[in-house]
Amino acid sequence: MNPQGKLIFALSLTLGTTLTISSNHWIMAWTGLEINTLAILPLISKSHHPRAIEAATKYFLVQAAASALVLFSSMTNAWHTGQWDITQLSHPTSCLILTVALAMKLGLVPFHFWFPEVLQGSSLIVGLLLSTLMKFPPITLLYLTSPSLKPSILMTMAILSAALGGWMGLNQTQTRKILAFSSISHLGWMAIIIAYSPKLALLNFYLYTLMTAAVFLSLNSIKALKLSTLMTTWTKTPSLNAILLLTLLSLAGLPPLTGFLPKWLIIQELTKQEVALAATIIALLSLLGQFFYLGLAYCATITLPPHTTNHMKQWYNTKPTNTMVAVLTTMSLMLLPISPIILAVV
């Protein structure tokens, strides 16, 4: 793809995201979502591989259905209340339809089936956009309408997302699919807290974006699409592999790394809201995710392949690591000590 095309699609993504997160009117928010969907489709299908075309088709169908439901929900609410304002969503049927629509947009269980397949058909950079930037507008809409949505439905979807995201990631050998199930699991943590503390859900999303970007860019630097490739990259970039281990553990939520902060705060808030049972269940389900993160980390730092077949060792890479990777990785590891400042800002 030529630079002009990339620039146009990047500007369209920025415009769509900005339009949705800054609008008060449902039609403007819907327009932003549509611009985003149309801008990302050429990026998904640019390789012209059948898997990429299939991923783009699946993405288009799911996002078009979800956008239609967003429009239907807002029109139903306007019909009954006369309000087009996003924060004035009050009709019960509209609230239910919107919950389903945003769950489809985000990839929450039981509307998660499209996400791993689309991510597997995309490149790592497009996968990064799908996992982070493309989830920002729906999360913002969820944030704005959270007082109107039913906490019981969100909690059910959140626990199911944490369970399935952890469980289905266990047996994967493709790094993109593992990160897709990781994303579904993290979305469960955001959905469970958004009805009680929307700001905490946004903080979780920001830190998740930070850590996921660090992992995706690290994997892109070493061109690791499968676990078997990841096992042989220690000769190519040993320092980056060692840091990737810590970033993955941060994404898993282990203290004293950055990823522990949102999980700690969410469990604390859920306990204050007297839903300690849900907090216990989702904390236990995070162990499933930790298991496959440890598997990834083991493959990234292993110095001998775990079988007897000969491997072609890769040449040591003398190029300096991308500055963006260095900055994101540092932030993914070291933000926990300054958590009081983060909480004061948020």
Image (tube, rainbow, N blue to C red):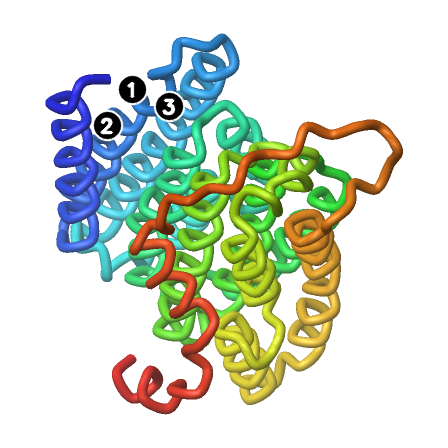
Report helix, strand or loop for mark 3.
helix
The amino acid sitting under disc 2 is Ala
Q: Nearer the viewer, residue 277 or 242?
A: 242
Report the Cα–Cα distance between label 2 and label 1. 7 Å
**Which residue lies most toward the right here?**
308
Circles 1 and 3: CB atoms closer than 8 Å: yes
Q: Which mark is residue 237?
A: none
Who's the residue at 44% across and 35% down the image? 124
Circles 2 and 3: CB distance less than 8 Å?
no
| Residue at which label 2 appears | 39
Badge 2 vs badge 1, beta-carbon distance below 8 Å: yes
Task: Provide residue 41's location: percent of width, then percent of height.
Answer: 32, 22
Residue bearing mark 3: 44
In the figure, is residue 327 to the left or right of 254? left
Residue at point 15%, 33% (across, down):
12
- Amino acid type assigned to the residue bearing label 3 in the image: Ile
Disc 2 to disc 3, C-alpha distance: 10 Å
Distance between mark 1 and mark 3 Cα atoms: 5 Å
**Closer to us: mark 2 or mark 3?**
3
Find numbered disc 1 in the image and state the secondary structure of the residue it sits on: helix
* Above/below status of 95 relative to 8: below
According to the picture, the residue beneath numbered tag 1 turns out to be 42
Closer-to-camera residue (222/335): 222
x and y percentages locating residue 66 in the rendered image:
39, 34
Q: In this rendering, is residue 102 above or below 252?
A: above
> Residue 235, relative to residue 249: is it above or below?
above
